Amino acid sequence: MREARVRKTKTVCTYCGVGCSFDVWTKDRKILKVEPRMEAPANQISTCVKGKFGWDFVNSSERLVKPLVRKEDRFVHVEWEEALDLVAGRLDEIRESHGPDAIACIASSKCTNEENYLMQKFARSVIGTNNIDNCSRYCQSPATWAMRNTMGYGGDSGSITDIARADLVVVIGANPAESHPVLSTRIRRAQKMRGQKLLVGDIRKNDLAARADLWVKPAPGTDLVWLAAVSNILLDRGWHDEAFVDRWVEGLSDWKESLAPYTVEYAEEITGVSRTELERVARMIRDADRVCFLWAMGVTQHTGGSETSAAICNLALATGQVGRPGTGVYPLRGHNNVQGAGDFGCAPDLLPGYQSVADESIRKKFAQAWGKELPTGPGYDNFTMIEKIHEGDLKALILKGEEIALVDANAGHVTRALEKLDFLVVQEVFLSETAKYADVVLPASPSLEKEGTFTNTERRIQRLSRVLSPLGDSRPDWEILVDLANRMGADWNYSHPKEILEEAVTLTDLMAGVTWERLDGYQSLQWPVHFDGSDTPLLYTDGFPRPGAKARFLPVSWTEPLRFSEEYDLHLNNGRMLEHFHEGNMTQRVPGLEEKVPKTYVEISPDLARERQISEGAQVRLVSPWGAVKLRAVVTDRVQGKELYIPMNDAGEGAINRLTGSHHDKHTRTPAYKELSVRMEVL
Ligand code: SF4
């Protein structure tokens, strides 16, 4: 028998928004090694443990390799023809009887830009609804809202290189060492090599907090208050950048007025951050020539997540820390392609390139290109979809690659909604918790088995090439969507993702100059990409894409976190862990990673452990108003006092969203995952 050939193929990591790219060496389906290269724009020769070793799930015996159809309450394998005929037929029936808005689609940040573009096109032009959303609703929608409303664009304002170049990095409610490991390495290196200063605002002593020049620990949900107090200090003492504000920013007096309640005294009382610390924060920002502001879900996943994000943007604008190398605002994208899913139109109110569905001329442009009249009003976001299912208005859901039964807040409420649906279709790699509720499960290929592009946290579009053939009868999501759309009356002739990308960029000025060829190998482009192929690593160097080229300060006001009854006496925080990705569907099927951290746990402070007589490894039950979970206790000083912390990567008994509720950010309806109190029982 002939020896299989060793192949080397370039791809892009699917595990976080840093967007590391590397070569994967394979022989048959065996992954021999992952090799990052100097020319990789975001990571050069680095990867983290997931990027390096996190791929064996592709050969898991649990992979879905044939379509599944529910018959008499159990799944049976069928051929693609039968499965797709059934899906098309049922969707047609539901649309006929209840109208197009009785159907919704959820796209995926794990899927390529081309697949996400097709999914929103499918929703809008085949089904006829704007009911399309993606998982940025669960994480960074509040940051996008704030950036669009202050500066104009909804993406990071600079590049990872700018973060490495800054004199001061301010990290608020983010844990890059575990969530964006290669980016965190860049910060650590800059600290060591050139004395970069680091300021962390976080309730937990994560890796960067432990190595920060200053770590402030505000009470949960009070970031806006201390940020507003720091803004007041800067403005009162004239430490802001007056020339920059005069030239480039409007709305100063309204913003100042909104800051009035947030005196230093008030901030000390509400946040627990002392006057000395607040003044030190202000001084560190004043004294640094180049400052980057980073934040993540510790800020956004609150009922006031959007306005706290705006408070960060305001602070960056007031101090002129935007539009120069080594400066900027960086909400760190969690999934590898959260940025791309939004860029390519998977939002209920925005077509690709952030063009409004309410704008008639925009709709006309898309209608002409797609040969279909398009729906006018905004559709349902992820949160509203669940409510609409419960109310009986939404009858069918099609989702790809999103584990909403575990990842949505208030999991019990979500799964009860899934049970109520008339028809649920899931495109997935494994039989996920969500897929278990489906009528039809379509086996999809993971990133290593497809071509396309991803867009990382710094707006960088990169191409991935097919490392392996799809396993069994599984197929890339774009192929599934093409076949489904054509069964429902479309005439889509795409034979390769390149053609989909070409169509998408002709409709969006933001990416006008993106071509497949310009993304060949390790080449990449950061949007906006002009027609001549020039791109924009740094935004706002010459003004803002807003009236008069001016940014604006947004007035802010603090939304007090939800109050729980005294019975729920412990605050529960949650986030990522280094070894696992998100709900764990992929990485928990990688033997090396699974052995290292097999089960999730709850972190308990030494003080609390002593008070409640809990020893390391004890079993505890956490109870919230919405559910209960059982976990192993880990006693650690990463958490203090009555704070608890659970990594979010458990698909089983310890899944955090069995505890979270449905309260959400007031502007974007992003669930307030971080506003949670529980009581603890020792078992
Ligand atoms: Fe890079 Fe993030 Fe993948 Fe790690 S998980 S290799 S940091 S993209």
Image (cartoon, helix red, strand yellow):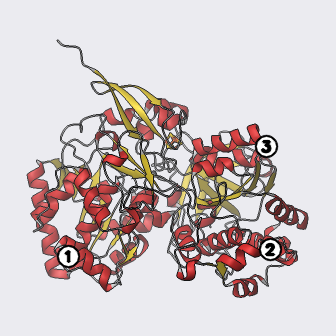
Q: Is residue 221 above or below residue 402?
A: below
Q: Of helix, strand and loop, which one carries label 2?
A: helix
Image location of residue 678, percent across then percent down: 64, 62
Mark 1 or mark 3: whose residue is earlier in sequence: 3
Residue 613, position as x, y percentages in the image: 76, 47
In the foreground, 393 or 16: 16
Pointer 3 or 2: first along the chain? 3
Mark 3, secondary structure of its residue: loop
Disc 1 and disc 3: Cα gap in Å? 55 Å
Residue 386 visible? The answer is yes
Q: Residues within 10 Å of mark 2 (few under 14, many from 20)?
A: many
The residue singled out by tag 1 in the image is: 368
Picture residue at 73% right of the left edge, 43% below the top: 636
Q: Would the CB of label 3 be found within 8 Å of ligand 1? A: no
Disc 1 secondary structure class: helix
Q: Is residue 454 above or below residue 298?
A: above
- Residue in view at x 26 percent, y 48 percent: 444
Marks 3 and 2, how far apart at CA: 27 Å
Which label is found at residue 540?
none
Camera sees residue 676: no
**In the rendered structure, which amino acid carries the disc numbered 2?**
Ala
Instruction: Report the front residue among 521 and 293.
Output: 521
Residue farthest along the top direction in this orientation: 1
> Residue 629 vs residue 467: left or right?
right
339 displayed left or right of 283:
left
Q: Residues within 10 Å of mark 1 (few under 14, many from 20)?
A: few
Q: CA distance from mark 2 to mark 1?
A: 51 Å
The N terminus is located in which quarter? top left
Give residue 622's position: percent from left, percent from top: 60, 56
* Mark linked to residue 229: 2
Q: Which residue is mark 3?
A: 195
The kind of residue on which mark 3 rests is Gly
